[in-house]
Amino acid sequence: MASSVREFYDGLAAEYHLVYGDRWDDAVQRQGAALDTLIRDLHGDAAHVLDCSCGIGTQAIGLALRGHRVHATDISEPSLERARVEARRLGASVSFAVADFRDLATVADTFDVVLSCDNALPHLLDEAEVASALRAMRSKLRPGGVLIISIRDYDKERPPAPPPYLVAGPPRRLVVRLHDWDAPDSPYYTVRFFFITEIADGWELAHHDARYRAMPRAELTAAAATAGFRDIVWREADDVGYHQPVMTGRA
């Protein structure tokens, strides 16, 4: 998993905001607000948060802007460099470090909340890797601390790819996303991003792809329980005001 996923996010770091069209800043605010409400409901106040798959900082920055003390880690150094730039630009105080969420031993502190959002966990292609990641997350939580995970709603459907869209720029960019499933009944698929950017003498193509495994809620619930979490609850996306369903549990 590690090298291919790392390469995917290393390559995607400079263009990741385009996943949100031209509204990444809005996504930072919107997702931060939804997660802030959830954390305060579960924890009772602002929290010390570990975002262990932070990417370019979408959730970490949003939470820091709402008063949470956030440490954010990711497997991709270029993504973290981009996150540092965006945090400074948006006026958010976040500490960043490289870590693989299957082994968080290099993260020295423990936290009120550990979160992994935006379908990061389904990059893990077998149950043993999922178990390792959940144990690592559990090890970074204080007693009674809260786990927050969001993934695509694989129980309802195979997630369709959105239609292509144009980001006005400048420069203009056409974003195309494909979901290539291994077989009609396979849980494995490849997500492919194509960024077509207008340049002085034409157009330039960049392509990034990564593997995923569709993960049913029951599997993730059982894995979380085995890792030592209790009070495991699934919240629908509309109920949380988030773009994906969210699973929570307590250490």
Image (cartoon, grey):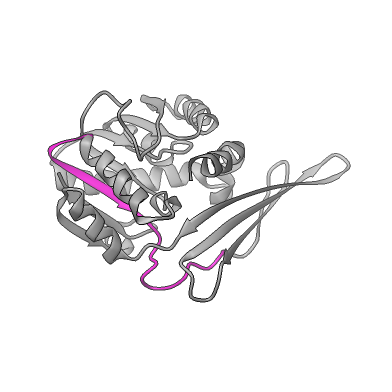
> Which residues lie in the magenta part?
140-161
Residue 4, x across and y down, in percent? 55, 44
* Up-down relation of residue 149 to residue 64 (above or below): below
Q: Nearer the viewer, residue 84 or 24?
A: 84
Q: Nearer the viewer, residue 247 or 3?
A: 3
Residue 231, x across and y down, in percent? 13, 55
Residue reaching furthest to the left: 143
Residue 24, x across and y down, in percent? 51, 44
Residue 58, x across and y down, in percent? 43, 40
Which quarter of the figure has residue 199? Answer: top right
Q: Nearer the viewer, residue 153 or 38?
A: 153
Q: Nearer the viewer, residue 12 or 168?
A: 12
Residue reaching furthest to the right: 201
- Residue 72 appears left or right of 167: left
- Residue 36 appears left or right of 170: left
* Up-down relation of residue 112 to residue 95 (above or below): below
Answer whether residue 33 is magenta in the image: no
